[in-house]
Structures are given as C-alpha cells and as structure tokens.
Amino acid sequence: MGSHCEIQLFDDSRVYAKRLAQKLGTEAHRLERKYSRFRSDSLASIINQQAGDKYGIKIDQETKLLFDHALTCFEESEGLFDITSGQLSRIWDFKSGRVPDHKRIAKAIEKTGFHKLSWHRSRLHMPAGMEIDFGGIVKEYAADSLAKLARALGSNSGLINLGGDFSVIGPMPENES
C-alpha cells in the first residue's frame, strides 16, 4: 500500500495469531491489487480505461460502497476531497515540488468533478479522460475491513495500521502491557 503497514494481534496461541495475520495480509493484498491506481491490472485502472465508454462499466457491490463513501467525503468537504482528481495527480510532480503550468492544471480540472459521474443501475459512466484515485480512502476502508474480518474469524484483540489509517479489532488483553 505504499506505506508502513502492520497487524498486531493478541491471542493465547501464537500459531493461531500467525495464521490469522496471514489471512489478513492476503486480504490487504487483494484490496491493494483491486484498488491501486499504480497497477495496470487493478479495477481502478480498468475503470479509468473505460472512461468515456458509452456503456460504462459494471461496478461490484464492494466498489459501489467505496464510491458511496467517496461521495460522502466529497459532500462533507464541500468538494475539496474528490476521487476523480486522478488527472491532477498525474500532472503534479510531488517528488520534485514542481507545480504544473496553469494550462495543464485547467485542462486536468476539466476532467475532474465527482458530480460528473453518472450511474445507471450498477453501471458507472465517467466522462472521457477522467481518472479516479481511491488512494485517499482505500487504506481506511482496508483497515476497517481487516478488523471486521479478524473479529469474524474469532480475534478479540488487536490493531490494524495501514500507513496511519488505524482500526481496532478489540482492546489489549488486561495481562498485556
């Protein structure tokens, strides 16, 4: 996920905790493969490749929930948080600190705007050239998903940290410090 990630589990059985950590790691890798814009085979990249397609792209329930959460973030931030800003991310060189010229920024902004997305049942339609980037919300989603999975698999105590996005499985046992 491009950052330091850790899973802390507290259990009487080290073997069980190790097996559970492996299952959680597998799920984290699945989510990264599915939503990373840096992977050409990810769903996020496929969605971006389908931008402008008159038929749109069919979106599964998990991804629809991410879009719903992104909409909430967009609305609550009054448009400042926008997963459709992929074109802006592409032209910005954060490593060198160079700011793109105004023409490039204006052109990228034309292809940005959550309000430009449209849905027909489970199909997403995006304007040609628009790119989504789940990077601002997918680690939070993944941390919560891993904690939920851990609890479903019987873990009562632990912490998920995915690059600073935390989720608590349950409290630390009383005999631990």
Image (cartoon, helix red, strand yellow):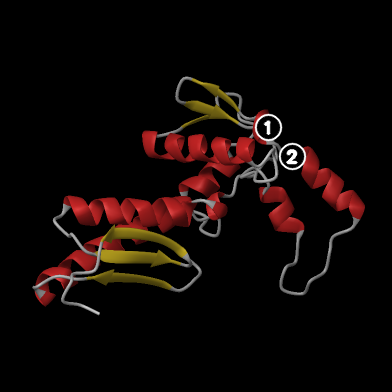
Instruction: Give x and y (percent) for residue 66.
Output: 47, 41
**Most extreme residue toward the right, as rendered?**
102
Quadrant of the rendered structure where residue 54 is?
top right
Amino acid type, callout 1: Pro
Within-10-Å neighbours for mark 2: few <14, some 14–19, many 20+:
many
At horizontal 34% and vertical 64% (from top left) the residue drawn is 160
Q: Looking at the image, is 133 positioned above or below residue 76?
A: below
Per the image, label 1 sits on a secondary structure element best described as loop
Within-10-Å neighbours for mark 1: few <14, some 14–19, many 20+:
many
| Viewer-closest of 105 and 170 | 170
Instruction: Give x and y (percent) for residue 90.
Output: 70, 56
Q: In the picture, which quadrant includes the C terminus?
A: bottom left
Amino acid type, callout 2: Lys
Left or right of 151? Residue 112 is right
Instruction: Give x and y (percent) for residue 7.
Output: 31, 69
Quadrant of the rendered structure where residue 95 is?
bottom right
What residue is disc 1 on? 127
Left or right of 29? Residue 13 is left
Q: Earlier in the sequence, mark 2 or mark 1?
A: 2
Instruction: Give x and y (percent) for residue 164.
Output: 48, 66
Rounded to the nearest angstrom, the CA distance separating label 2 from label 1 is: 7 Å
- Badge number at residue 115: none
| Viewer-closest of 61 and 44 | 61
What residue is disc 2 on? 111
At horizontal 20% and vertical 53% (from top left) the residue drawn is 151
Dots 2, 1 in contact, CB < 8 A: yes
Per the image, label 2 sits on a secondary structure element best described as loop
Left or right of 60? Residue 117 is right
**Most extreme residue toward the top, as rendered?**
120
Quadrant of the rendered structure where residue 83 is?
top right
**Most extreme residue toward the bottom, as rendered?**
177
